[in-house]
Image: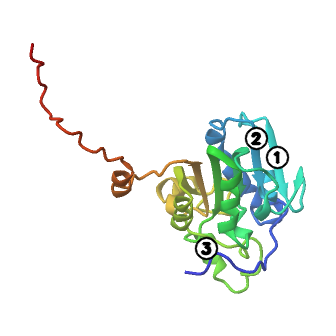
Amino acid sequence: MKPARIPLKATAPRHWAEMPWGEYYREALEQQLKPWLAKLYGFHLLKIGNLSAEINTDACAISHQVNVSLDGNPVQVKADPLYLPFAEKSVDACLLAHTLPWCSDPHRLLREADRVLIDDGWLILTAFNPISLMGLRKMVPVLRNRMPYNSRMFSLVRQLDWLALLNFEVLHQGRFQVLPWTKQGGRLLSMHLPALGCLQVIVARKRTVPLTLNPMRQSKAKTQLRPAVGATRQYRKPQD
């Protein structure tokens, strides 16, 4: 397995339209995210990265939505996503739409998102699926340096492991758009063979307690009471 942290060699696209069939990807993602965006609530939504800024989030009830990126348009806060200029636990939801594929240090990016999220805050991740037709095209040497094949394609299992280490509870995971060059993405194929979809999405929430209790640690945390002198388990009726 290749290391997650590498020197950044490829430049992230500023718009979905810069990629072949990029508008199809954006529309497919918006369709998949729409029911989940309707469940978000709070005061602040961070859309991290150029591609996140172009995702239509009108279905989200959070009114204050901020686009964060080093460049691009529209951007309200110009900053490096690896060094978010926000206080800890100040954001209700973070959207990283295909931000990980062009990130040099995805672990740090997820830690930054975890830092700024409030307890029980929402995190939405989208990326390319390496086990897909797009993943096969990435293996062609001629296409390897072209967009979007110059991006990094992390498997769904690997991303779930990263979220588990940060104590996120995954509420939804899915893959779709089997045929990247069609607008519908091959509806029948996406229905029967979703594992081959070139796009993948994860919806998770930040939890403040371990999702799996450690019985040994729990037993050590209990305070042991010393037995009182003369105390028994039976009730003794006082004598007259």
Figure check: 100 above or below 140: above
Q: Earlier in the sequence, mark 3 or mark 1?
A: 1
**According to the image, label 1 marks what residue?**
66
Q: Earlier in the sequence, mark 3 or mark 2?
A: 2
Alpha-carbon span between mark 3 and mark 1: 32 Å
Tell me where residue 80 sits by quadrant. bottom right
Residue at 73% x, 45% y: name it: 91
Q: Please give left or right for residue 80 compared with residue 124 in the image.
A: right
Residue at 48% x, 60% y: name it: 193
Q: How dense is the environment of label 2, judged by Cα within 10 Å: few (below 14), some, or many (20 and up)?
A: some
Residue nearest the observer in this picture, 138 or 233 = 233
Q: Amino acid at mark 2?
A: His
Q: Amino acid at mark 3?
A: Gly
Q: Amino acid at mark 1?
A: Val
Residue 168 in view of the camera: yes
Question: Residue 120: horizontal and vertical position, in percent?
Answer: 59, 43
Residue nearest the observer in this picture, 3 or 207 = 207
Residue nearest the observer in this picture, 130 or 41 = 41
Q: How dense is the environment of label 3, judged by Cα within 10 Å: few (below 14), some, or many (20 and up)?
A: some
Say which of marks 3 and 2 sits in front: 2
Residue 32 in view of the camera: no
Q: Which element carries disc 1, helix, strand or loop?
A: strand
Q: Earlier in the sequence, mark 1 or mark 2?
A: 2
**According to the image, label 3 marks what residue?**
135
Q: Which mark is residue 168?
A: none
Query: How is the model colour-coded?
Result: rainbow
**According to the image, label 2 marks what residue?**
44
Residue at 63% x, 82% y: name it: 139
Q: Which element carries disc 3, helix, strand or loop?
A: helix
Q: Which element carries disc 2, helix, strand or loop?
A: strand
Answer yes or no: do the residues labelled 1 and 2 have beta carbons within 8 Å? Answer: yes
